[in-house]
Image: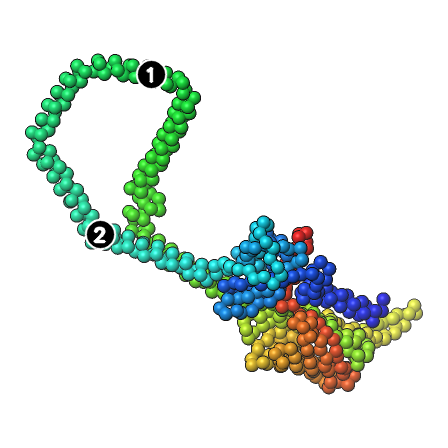
Amino acid sequence: MSHTARVGVFMLAALVILGVFIVKIEEIPIGTRGGRFRVKAVFPSVAGLDEKSAVRIAGVRVGIVESIKLQGDRALATLALDRDVVLHEGARAEVTSLGMLGDKYVELSPGSPSGPVLPAGATLNGTSPIGFDEALKSFNSAFSNIDAVAGSLRGSLASPEGEKRLNEIMENIRQLTASVRDLVQANRTNVDATMANVRDFSETLKTELPRLADKLAAFADHLDALVAENRGNVDASIANVKQVTAEMRVTVDNINKITGKIASGQGSVGKLINDDATVDNLNSTLTSARGAADSLKNTLGRAERWHLDMNMRAEALPGLTKNRALGVLYNSRSAFGFDLHTTAERFYRLELVDSPVGRVNNYTQTITTISPDGHSETSIQETQRISDNNTFNAQVGFEYKGYTFRAGLFESRGGVGVDRALLDHRLNLTLEAYDFSRDVKPPHIRFETRYFLTRNLFAYAGLDDPVWAQQRSVLFGGGVTWRDEDIKYLLGTVSSMGSGK
């Protein structure tokens, strides 16, 4: 297959892939999705939710978030749902996420099937989960309360004033026992009279006990008859009483073990009460935990501000003719890579570039031939090789007031570039200069005008290497870019297709 045919096949495949990506990313209504209907949902907050985020019922994807706008102090989201979804009166919407740090999506509760069916355009009430910052505030507040309690215990038990209070309590107990002893001695006469009454009662009981025993025997006979009639119920009740008694005995044993360990200073609570060093260690641990929570909050905050843009483009250079002596192999260029934005002003670019111009290297080889008669002849043979056809871009960029300044490797050669954004970033002007060390008319200059037809699809034209007439050419081409939210949506779609949902 000729090189032109390979380029044609590559461009055709790229256009097919581009078409599929555009259909997926732009949610062009095709097939069963052509009849989607729309409802609205009002949320207190949609932090983390973007346009084209998934809408799910019971975890199954049934639509997308078509648009989000502000309505007063609340967020109004328009949801595009598949036509086989039926919502009833009482349906609700909730912003949730896939896992702890997963992507945000809208979970629908379709309402009771016995209720009336909601028409298209209905407005649902939405709820939002507690934010991560609020959870961290609650976590910090809990640690502050624990720190305050630990400080109070240490101040009460470890200070000289606390020791004085304990001595006062022991003295009060001693005085109380002395008062009880004095009280008993002072009421000795009353105690003797009580004992005399007890003796009289025992004498009376001695005479009345036989009659009481007869009555008890008669009652026992009646009770035996009653028990015989209800033997099954009595056995079950006694078994329940035994079980409850055994459980209570186990509970009392556990309480005794716990209080014994606390009193002897064993375990965390025992050490907290009896050991000053444990209180100090607890305070130190709480301080470290607070610092770790702040560090985790800052780290996650920085990671949430990063976003990734992936790019794929292909262009034609009709003015560039094949010239092996100059290293020109064909008249097209393609690239694939990504931009990693770590802050609002700085990003890093890495791209693989299939360049039409390779570097020409000349090699000289000396060949000596010896004939049968011993005569030798020496010849010099020069060969030419072209390398560096597959190159890469590795650049760092800084944005300042609508301008973007880049520096690094351009097609594996050092260079610089500047971009100017116009028309609310729909039109970009680019000027690049690189390969300052080439032998003929350095550097390589490239001028490009890029226009975004949609948020993801762009076309561009320009002039390549205008200072070198043999390699000068106009250029035109197109490409596609995937923003951070587009990549998340596309990966979620592929995952759903792979799991059969």
The picture places residue 268, in percent across and down from the top left corner, at 35, 46
- Asked if 82 appears above or below 245 in the picture, the reply is below
Q: Which of 358 and 19 is in front in this view?
A: 19
The picture places residue 377, in percent across and down from the top left corner, at 88, 74
Quadrant assignment for the N terminus = bottom right
What's the amino acid at mark 1? His
Q: Quadrant of residue 22?
A: bottom right
Say whether residue 125 is left or right of residue 385.
Answer: left
- Asked if 7 appears above or below 39 in the picture, the reply is below
Which residue is label 1 attached to?
222
Which residue is label 2 attached to?
162
What's the amino acid at mark 2? Gly
Which residue corresponds to the image point at 57% horizontal and 78% vertical from the top-left? 399
SS of the residue at dot 1?
Answer: helix
Mark closest to the chain's N terminus, 2 or 1: 2
Q: Could you tell me if residue 176 is visible in this image?
A: yes
The picture places residue 400, in percent across and down from the top left corner, at 56, 80
Q: Could you tell me if residue 485 is visible in this image?
A: no
Task: Tell me whether the residue at label 2 lies in contact with that at label 1, contact meaning CB atoms closer than 8 angstroms.
Answer: no
Real-space Cα separation, disc 2 to disc 1, in angstroms: 65 Å
- Asked if 12 appears above or below 331 in the picture, the reply is above
Say whether residue 491 is left or right of residue 318.
Answer: left
Q: Which of 260 and 217 is in front in this view?
A: 217
Q: Nearer the viewer, mark 2 or mark 1?
A: 1
Q: In which quarter of the image is residue 265?
A: top left
Picture disc at residue 32: none
SS of the residue at dot 2?
Answer: helix
